[in-house]
Image: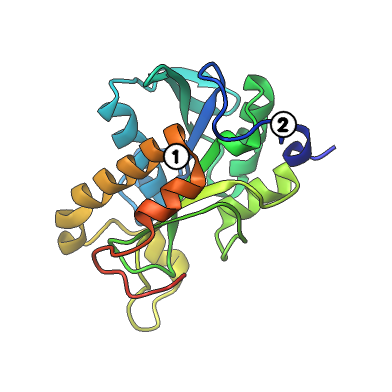
Amino acid sequence: MHLLNRFRTVAPEAANDEVTLIVGLGNPGREYASNRHNVGFLTADRWAAAHTIAFNKVQQHAIIAPGRVDDRRVIAAKPQTYMNESGRAVGALLRFYKVPVERLLVIFDDLDLPFGTIRLRAEGGAGGHNGMRSIMQHLGGNQFARLRIGIGRPPGRMDPAAFVLQDFSRAEAAELDSLLDRAVQAIDVFTKEGITIAMNQFNANQPGDRTTL
């Protein structure tokens, strides 16, 4: 049985003892720490710090930060499997903590959104993102919430694979704090109110937003 069917058991507005799993995608290692491809890790770090929750435990191929926010059980996770194998960690964490798939949020970088834009969706395709493709393969479907962090397109004919493994430019780095802060706010609404309310609140009227994706 696919994980998406096995754990689709309760609505987003479930009891406070239900676990919410917040997964930021990235690559482990200092050489990748400030890459555009690691904005999922950066967002997870910012969210955990905002709630004084520490990444202090290794569990199921991931570094995790367990805690409570507004009396709700939460676990932030950063898979340590490298991006292309992110699904191994996400699937294992869902099973180990018995997390309903409605309480999973995956955060990742998106080339198709302008830098400075965030977009929440309740489901969708991988969009060419290898980490998301791996998660969908391990979960057996695409019906889980995701928070896309816009990093923009590479300049000229630059290979997208090289672009995502570069650090943010100086101009982007100056705006990164406000981008991460908005992402943290979106995560908080998701954990408290669910994906529909989070989408309604954060998917419109954003700085640098020129898309309708």
The amino acid type, in three-letter code, at marker 1 is Phe
Residues packed near mark 1 inside 10 Å, few (<14), some (14 to 19) or many (20 plus):
many
Q: In the figure, 30 relative to 182: above or below?
A: above
**24 and 17: which is toward the camera:** 17
User: Residue drawn 45% across and 20% down?
Assistant: 72
Q: In the figure, 23 relative to 53: above or below?
A: below
User: Residue drawn 47% across and 44% down?
Assistant: 25
1 and 2 marks in contact (CB < 8 Å): no
State the image coordinates of residue 145 (x, y, percent, origin top left): 55, 47
State the image coordinates of residue 7 (x, y, percent, origin top left): 72, 32
Q: Is residue 168 left or right of residue 127?
A: left
Point out which mark residue 37 bears.
none
Point out which mark residue 9 bears.
2
Q: Secondary structure at mark 1?
A: helix
Determine the image quadrant of residue 60: top right
User: Residue drawn 46% across and 24% down?
Assistant: 74
Residue 148 seen by the camera: no
Q: Secondary structure at mark 2?
A: loop
State the image coordinates of residue 75 (x, y, percent, origin top left): 48, 25
The residue singled out by tag 1 in the image is 190
For the image, the number of numbered tags is 2
Q: Split into 4 quadrants, where in the image is the N terminus?
A: top right
Q: Earlier in the sequence, mark 1 or mark 2?
A: 2
